[in-house]
């Protein structure tokens, strides 16, 4: 998949997870790369300065498989869910100008982020709260409550 921007790793991880679940014993390698410096737009606005400061080149890779329960606890994908907030499309995004991408960051972004993240985490944690899995040592892991508590601490 190409052209997904800074959020591209998540749908790529979803497709890799779908693949290994459909083909047990298989392995999926995902490489996510973003090269913002290839198209920096420069003007005299604070929005552009902030956008260029927080967006950078980067890459990440992960290897995913589905097989027997490991003997040591390893990270596991529990679930995926997407949330769309079309009312905010004009607040964060990209605009094509002079053949380059200019980031759009409305001044209300700082006020929007925490409530949107909290709403998504609330919906996810209620779905995950009853999801348990057995680790390699036989202990039960309740991921939802611990994740929600940690994230909520950072939102306040």
Image (cartoon, rainbow, N blue to C red):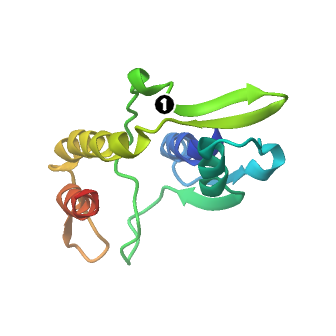
Q: Residue 125: image x %, image y %?
A: 21, 47
User: Crowding at label 1, few (<14), some or many (≥20) Cα neighbours within 10 Å?
Assistant: some
Horizontal side, residue 87 vs residue 44: left or right: left
Q: Which residue is mark 1?
A: 91
Q: Residue 147: image x %, image y %?
A: 26, 60
Q: Is residue 3 above or below residue 78?
A: above
Q: Is residue 149 above or below residue 22?
A: below
Q: Residue furthest top?
A: 87
The front one of 68 and 87 is 87
Quadrant in which the C terminus appears: bottom left
Q: Is residue 30 visible?
A: no
Q: Residue 128: image x %, image y %?
A: 22, 47
Quadrant in which the N terminus appears: top right
Q: Residue furthest front?
A: 44
SS assignment at label 1: loop
Q: Is residue 6 visible?
A: yes
């Amino acid at each position: 998949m190409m052209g997904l921007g800074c959020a591209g790793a998540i749908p790529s991880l979803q497709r890799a997870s779908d693949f290994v679940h459909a083909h047990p014993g298989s392995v999926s390698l995902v490489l996510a790369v973003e090269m913002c410096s290839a198209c920096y737009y420069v003007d005299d606005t604070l929005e552009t300065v902030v956008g260029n400061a927080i967006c950078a080149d980067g890459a990440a890779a992960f290897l995913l498989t589905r097989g027997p329960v490991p003997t040591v606890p390893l990270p596991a994908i529990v679930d995926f869910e997407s949330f769309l907030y079309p009312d905010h499309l004009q607040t964060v995004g990209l605009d094509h100008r002079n053949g380059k991408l200019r980031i759009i960051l409305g001044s209300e972004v700082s006020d929007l982020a925490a409530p949107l993240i909290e709403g998504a985490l609330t919906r996810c944690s209620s779905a995950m709260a009853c999801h348990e899995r057995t680790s390699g040592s036989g202990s039960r892991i309740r991921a939802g409550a611990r994740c929600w508590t940690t994230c909520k601490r950072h939102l306040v």
